[in-house]
Each structure stands twice: as C-alpha cells, then as structure tokens.
Amino acid sequence: MYSAFRTLCERLLRIPPDPHPPPGDEASTRSYRAAANYFKYLVVLWCLSSGLTVLIPLVIEVVLLAVAFTSREVHLAWALIPGAILLLTLLIAALRLAVLRLNYEKRWYIVTDRSLRVREGVVGVREMTVTFANIQNISISQGPVQRLLGIADLRVDTAGGGGAATQHHAGPDLHVAWFRGIDNAPVVRELIQQRLRQWKDAGLGDHEDVASEAAHSHDSADMIAALREVHAAAQALRNATANYLPNAQR
C-alpha cells in the first residue's frame, strides 16, 4: 500500500529523481543518506504530536457513548460525531506518517572536492548547493533521543548566516545546510574540513583574499625595486668619492 502511495506522490507532486552531484571530481564524490534510526526518531516525534490530537476526540467519544447508552440524554447519532472526527484524525495521522517516510527516503547529502549539496522535502522540495568558498562554520547538534538512537545533525553555516542566535524569521534558513539524522556526523565533518583545507592549499581562496595578496605582492615588488635604486645610487656615490680622494691628495 505504501508503494502505491509513494508512486502516486512522485507523479502528482513531480518529486525530482535522485539529485545529480554538484561540480567537482567524480572520483571524490561521497553520497550520504539519513540513518535508519532517523526514521525511528521521526516516528517518535509523530507519536508525540499525534497522540494528543487523537486522545481528545477519543475521550469525548467514549463519554458521549456512555451517556447515550445509559441515560439516553444524548442521542446516539450525536454521540457518533466525535467518532467521525476521531476517524478523520486517524486518517490524517496515517497520511502524515506516510509523508514522513517518503521525506526520509527522498533525503540526500552529497559532498565533492569543491562543494556540497543537500536535498530534502516532498511537498516543497529544497535542494541547496554550498561551495567551500562560502562555508564559515561546521557544527554537530544531538538531542537526548538522538543520542539514544546514535544519530546527530550536522549543521553547515554559510556566509551571511549570522548564526542561530540571530535567526528570527520564519521558514527555512537559506544560509544553513543540514545533514539531518546521520549516524557518522564526526566522519562527515572531518571529510568536509579536510577538503576545505585542500581547497585552500590549492590556492582557491576567496577573490578578496587573492586580490589582497596580489596587491601586497605588488607593493613588495615596488619597495624592492626602490631599495635597489637607492643601493645603486649609494654604490655610485661611493665609487665617485673613492676616485676623488686620491686626486685630492696628489
């Protein structure tokens, strides 16, 4: 049944196929998926959020049915209304669970030697590519339930992000890329940091840094040329003085 639901969603929502790697060396490309325990983590959150919405109409239904069958003060038809609401709530909860499973399956993380790409979402698909030139910080976050399941979230902050403390707007943060629910977050972080170092060692830094270094090199060359001219003038003055002194003594 879930397979039919997945096929229907892929057609109706036009969910893109597996993402293509961002620019970079194909041999260095590494693809990652959310761990199996990440779906268990999503199910835990689903249970917590759905439990209260299902419990309220269930309690109302039980109370009204008890009153209807005992005192007949409540007509049986009215007592069944909360039951219909409960059934609708259960259907919506099941649909949310199926969407969570599909979202888990369609989540991708790709790292090359030049950039990384994150793809997530089902109804609203979000695909984000980050070049190493824009990466400013890499951190790992892990809550108690995630720690119990052995998973963590890897956060990559890019230029202009401003950090978590300054984010007050609604909606997804376009300056943060998340590797959510992975079971090897330290390994992925080390890989990104290693390729960042290789990228910088290869002389592929920011354009501003390159321009600054070029300007500094140009100033240094001008200073060396000026010092050489001063040295040549001093040497010529010394030779002229040496030639004059013997003539003066004679």
Image: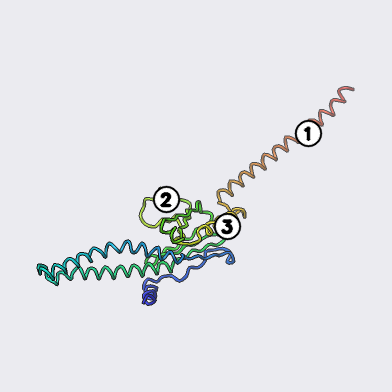
Q: Which residue is mark 2?
A: 164
As shown in the figure, which amino acid type bears the numbered disc 2? Ala
User: Which residue is painted at 39% across and 57% down in the image?
Assistant: 172
Q: Quadrant of the N terminus?
A: bottom left
From the image, tell me which residue sits under label 3: 195
Would you place residue 36 above or below residue 212 in this image?
below
Dot 1 or dot 3: first in sequence order is 3
Between 238 and 61, the one lying in front of the other is 61
Give SS at disc 2. Answer: helix
Describe residue 244's horizontal placement relative to residue 163 as left or right.
right
Q: Residue at coordinates 70% horizontally, 40% vertically from top-left?
A: 225
Q: Nearer the viewer, residue 24 or 209?
A: 24
What kind of residue is marked 3? Arg
Distance between the Cα atoms at labels 1 and 3? 52 Å
x, y percent for residue 174: 43, 56
**Quarter that holds the C terminus:** top right
* The one of 94 and 119 positioned closer to us in this rendering: 94
Query: Relative to 17, is 92 on the left or the right?
Result: left
The residue indicated by pointer 1 is: 235
Quarter assignment of residue 42 = bottom left
* Residue type at the position of mark 1: Gln
